[in-house]
C-alpha cells in the first residue's frame, strides 16, 4: 500500500520540521498565537506565529511562550515593508466617509501617518539573533541577502506567492520553499504588489491551477494554501505537485485560536452566506465574509495599506466590544462553512486520516 504522501520526505527541504504535510497559516490579528502554534506542532503538523502588526518585543515574547509549550519546530511569519502608494487625499476622503461609523461605535478613527515597514528590520534582527526553524514572508519577496543571512543562522525560509512570476522571484532570491496562495484563501492576498488600478482580487488564480503551473515553473517545494478545509482537498493539492498544505480558516475556529468568538461563530453562521475580496478594512485586497461594513464601504475604500488598516482598527475593536460582527473584519476562506470546532491537535489528526483515506480510495 502506498504511503499517504510518498513524495513528501524525499522532495521537501522542510521535511525535517514536520511529520505531516499540514501547516497552520500565520493569521495576523491575534488568531495565530503560541497556544495554536504549539498545539499544531505537537500533533505533528507545523504551527506558525504571526508577527504582523506586532512589535519586535511582542513577537519575541510569543516565540518564548511557544518554546515553553512545545519542543517541536514552528515558524514565524513576517510582513515585508510596503511602498508608499497611498493617495493621502483618498485616505482623507475615506476618513470622512467613516465618520458616521466612529460616532455610532463611540470611538476614534486611527492615525494613518505611521510607518509602512511593520518594523521588518527590527524583527529580522531578533530572528537572526535567536533563530527559529522557519520564517515565512508575506506581501513581497525578501532580498537575497536577507534570505542568505537566515540560511546561515540555520533558518529555513518560505515566501508567499500568488502567481508563477512571484514564485519564480522567490526561487531566484534563494528561498527554500514557496507558499502558493490560491484565490480561494481567506484574509489578505499575499501578493508582492497590490495594484491600485485593479479590483481587489481580480485576475487571481485558483489553487489547483496555480500549484500545477508553479510546479512546472520552479524547482522549489510548494506549500499549497487557499480554501483547504478537508484532508481530501489536501490529498488533491499533494497530487497536483504540492509537498504540504497550509490551512488558516480551518484552524481559526479551534479553541486554541485567539480569534474573537464572534469571528469564530460567523464561520458557520447562516447569516453570512458568502465571501468577497475587499479593501474596506485594511486598504489591501483581502477575502472576508460579506457583512454590512464590507457592502457599504468596500466600493469606496482606497488602495492604501496599511493606512486604512490603522484607520479602521479602533472601529473594528469597538464593534467587537459591542458584539456586532457587522463591522468586524471577518476574514474567511471560501470553504468557511466546512469549519469544524475541534481542538487543533485533533484537527491535525483528522486531516491526516482523511488524507490517507483519500489516497487509499484513489489507489
Image (cartoon, rainbow, N blue to C red):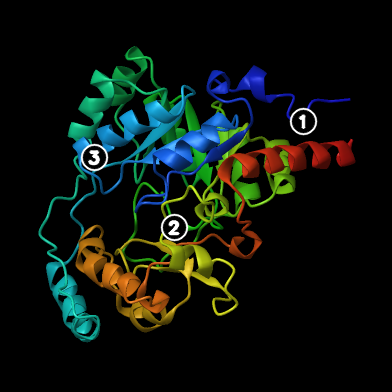
C-alpha span from label 3 to label 1 = 38 Å
Secondary element type, mark 1: loop
C-alpha span from label 1 to label 2 = 29 Å
Residue 348 in sight here = yes
Which of label 3 and label 1 is nearer to you?
3
Which of label 2 and label 3 is nearer to you?
3
Secondary element type, mark 2: strand
| Residue receiving disc 3 | 58
- Image location (x, y in percent) of residue 235: 73, 41
Depth order, front residue of 171/47: 47
- Image location (x, y in percent) of residue 327: 36, 76
Quarter of the image where one finds residue 149: top left
Secondary element type, mark 3: helix
Image: 127 above or below 189: above
Report the side of 329 relative to 283 (left or right). Answer: right
Depth order, front residue of 161/42: 42
| Residue receiving disc 2 | 187
Circles 3 and 1, Cβ within 8 Å, touching? The answer is no
Image: 130 above or below 227: above
Quadrant occupied by the C terminus: top right
**Mark 1: few/some/many CA within 10 Å (<14, 14-19, 20+):** many
At horizontal 49% and vertical 58% (from top left) the residue drawn is 186
Image: 236 above or below 42: below
- Image location (x, y in percent) of residue 361: 88, 41
C-alpha span from label 2 to label 3 = 22 Å
**Mark 2: few/some/many CA within 10 Å (<14, 14-19, 20+):** many
- Image location (x, y in percent) of residue 289: 49, 70
Depth order, front residue of 126/196: 126
Quadrant occupied by the N terminus: top right
Which sits earlier in the primary sequence, circle 1 or circle 2?
1
Which circle marks residue 4 in the picture?
A: 1
Amino acid at each position: 500500500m502506498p504511503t499517504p504522501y510518498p513524495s513528501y520526505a524525499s522532495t521537501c527541504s522542510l521535511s525535517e520540521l514536520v511529520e505531516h504535510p499540514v501547516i497552520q497559516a500565520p493569521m495576523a490579528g491575534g488568531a495565530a498565537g503560541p497556544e495554536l502554534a504549539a498545539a499544531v506542532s505537537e500533533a505533528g503538523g507545523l504551527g506558525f506565529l504571526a508577527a504582523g502588526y506586532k512589535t519586535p518585543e511582542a513577537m519575541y515574547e510569543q516565540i518564548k511562550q511557544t518554546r515553553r509549550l512545545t519542543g517541536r519546530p514552528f515558524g514565524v511569519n513576517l510582513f515585508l515593508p510596503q511602498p508608499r502608494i497611498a493617495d493621502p487625499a483618498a485616505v482623507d476622503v475615506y476618513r470622512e466617509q467613516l465618520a458616521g461609523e466612529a460616532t455610532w461605535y463611540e470611538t476614534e478613527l486611527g492615525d494613518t501617518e505611521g510607518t509602512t515597514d511593520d518594523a521588518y528590520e527590527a524583527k529580522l534582527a531578533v530572528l537572526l539573533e535567536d533563530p527559529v526553524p522557519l520564517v515565512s514572508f508575506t506581501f513581497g519577496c525578501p532580498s537575497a541577502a536577507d534570505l542568505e543571512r537566515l540560511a546561515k543562522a540555520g533558518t529555513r525560509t518560505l515566501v508567499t506567492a500568488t502567481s508563477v512570476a512571484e514564485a519564480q522571484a522567490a526561487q531566484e532570491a534563494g528561498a527554500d520553499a514557496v507558499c502558493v496562495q490560491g484565490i480561494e484563501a481567506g484574509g489578505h492576498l499575499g501578493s508582492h504588489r497590490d495594484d491600485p488600478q485593479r479590483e481587489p482580487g481580480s485576475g487571481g488564480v485558483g489553487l489547483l491551477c496555480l500549484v500545477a503551473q508553479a510546479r512546472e515553473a520552479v524547482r522549489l517545494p510548494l506549500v499549497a494554501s487557499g480554501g483547504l478545509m478537508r484532508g481530501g482537498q489536501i490529498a488533491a493539492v499533494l497530487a497536483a505537485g504540492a509537498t504540504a498544505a497550509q490551512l488558516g480558516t480551518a484552524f481559526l475556529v479551534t479553541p486554541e485560536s485567539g480569534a474573537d468568538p464572534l469571528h469564530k461563530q460567523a464561520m458557520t453562521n447562516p447569516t453570512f452566506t458568502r465571501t468577497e475580496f475587499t479593501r474596506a478594512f485594511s486598504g489591501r485586497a483581502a477575502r472576508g465574509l460579506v457583512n454590512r461594513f464590507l457592502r457599504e464601504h468596500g466600493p469606496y475604500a482606497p488602495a492604501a495599506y496599511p493606512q486604512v488598516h490603522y484607520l479602521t482598527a479602533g472601529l473594528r475593536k469597538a464593534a467587537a466590544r459591542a458584539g456586532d460582527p457587522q463591522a468586524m473584519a471577518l476574514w474567511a476562506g471560501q470553504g468557511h462553512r466546512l469549519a469544524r470546532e475541534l481542538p487543533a491537535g485533533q484537527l491535525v489528526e483528522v486531516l491526516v486520516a482523511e488524507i490517507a483515506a483519500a489516497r487509499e480510495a484513489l489507489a
